[in-house]
Image (cartoon, coloured by chain):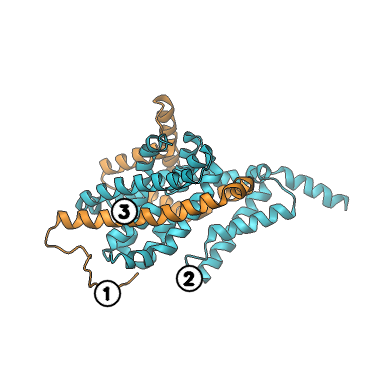
Chain colours: A orange, B cyan
Amino acid sequence: MIPALTLLLLCQLAGEVIARLLSLPLPGPVIGLVLLAVGLTIRGKVPDNVRAVATGILRNLALMFVPASVGIITQTHVLAANGLALTVSLIVSTIVTMAVTAFVFRWATMRANPGHDAGGDPRGEKEAG
Amino acid sequence: MANVEKLWVYLAETPLLWLAITLTAYTFADWISSLAKRHPLVNPIVIATGLIIAALSVSHTDYKTYFGGAQFVHFMLGPATVALAIPLVDNLSQIRRSVIPISLALVAGSATAILSAVGTAWLFGAPHNLLMSLAPKSVTTPIAMGLSETLGGIPSLTAVLVVATGIFGAITVTPLMNLMRINDPAARGFAVGLTSHGMGTARAFQVNALAGTFAGLAMGLNGLMTALLAPLLAGLF
């Protein structure tokens, strides 16, 4: 567990160092993510201990959102003053983004495989979701 | 009574109390969520946050004191972001097969997420730091908070907006995709993962394993794409 956690922290550290030295607009952990992904791809296999620790952390990802979310108590004045703008913006943006993404994905899939229906059958009524 | 006061002075000074309360609230919230069979409306983050805010207000504790304890949990967001490399690597063969739809939907979706959120709030005349807080709202919290800070937003407000986007997307994906008659699980999953990060991904896995895989992929890729696009696009406002 400790070697795997050390690997994650070293990737993050390397990411922070690179971001600062090169003044990149990317957060350090994102660069760390890329470094680890490249390293694992070159190695060709995810070591079992790294997989175990990563899975354990990601399974409880929701926990790590909690302290930041409690930070809402420091933002009540901002929310009170701009509640309508924020609410409308979130609703519009979430729906439009989901629709555009799914639409482009389906369009590109159908263009890449002409004649192969990617599930966009207008009569398709069977629905699992 | 003097002992009780001494005890409170001790507890108020160590990170132990609020760290323990954070973990307890989360454990309880996660239990409630599993009882509700992971219904999208019964969100463990929302429940845990509500319980902690109640404890803070009853004990007249400010956020700075709370964060003194909770920072240890918060710190794990960094390694958690790095850990997202594992599902990304796992799905590499899937990614290679759908590289064109993934790339096009990624660029279109990521730009739409940033421009539609910032643009709508801009029309309402929201101040600049609010617009910058909204720009990264579709990506997973560790990336979103880092970006918010870089852009000149308010990271803790961004965290709240990220959670709200996650919950709203997870609730609306199924009816919206049905309405659009998009039945391909890859397209459905990719859309919800891109829009609503981890919460959307969790929702997609509840419906279909392929949808979940593409949602996780979209979450990871949009984290990177937004980190590249947000500084450019948000600069327009």
**What is the C-alpha distance between the residues marked 2 and 3?**
28 Å
**What is the C-alpha distance between the residues marked 1 and 3?**
21 Å
Residue farthest to the bottom?
Answer: A126
Residue neighbourhood size for the residue with mark 1, other residues' Cα within 10 Å, grouped as few (<14), some (14–19), many (≥20) = few
2 and 3 marks on the same chain: no
Q: Are dots 2 and 3 in contact, CB under 8 Å?
A: no
Q: Mark number for residue B37? A: 2
Percent x, y of residue B49: 60, 55
- State the SS at label 1: loop
Residue neighbourhood size for the residue with mark 3, other residues' Cα within 10 Å, grouped as few (<14), some (14–19), many (≥20) = many
Kind of residue sitting beneath label 3: Thr
Q: Quadrant for the C terminus of chain A, please.
A: bottom left
Q: Quadrant of residue B94?
A: bottom left
Residue farthest to the right?
Answer: B1
Residue neighbourhood size for the residue with mark 2, other residues' Cα within 10 Å, grouped as few (<14), some (14–19), many (≥20) = few
Look at 26% across and 53% down and name the residue there: A104
Look at 28% across and 48% down and name the residue there: A45
Where is mark 1, residue-wise?
A125
Look at 50% across and 34% down and name the residue there: B152
Mark nearest the camera among 2 and 3 is 3
Give the left or right position of residue B174, taking residue A86 as reference. Answer: left
Kind of residue sitting beneath label 2: Lys
Q: Mark number for residue A101? A: 3
Q: Mark number for residue B82? A: none
Kind of residue sitting beneath label 1: Glu
Q: What chain is tagged by disc 1?
A: A
Q: What chain is tagged by disc 3?
A: A
Of residues A117 and A55, which is closer to you in this image?
A117
Residue farthest to the left?
Answer: A115
Q: Does residue B135 show up? A: yes
Percent x, y of residue B204: 37, 62
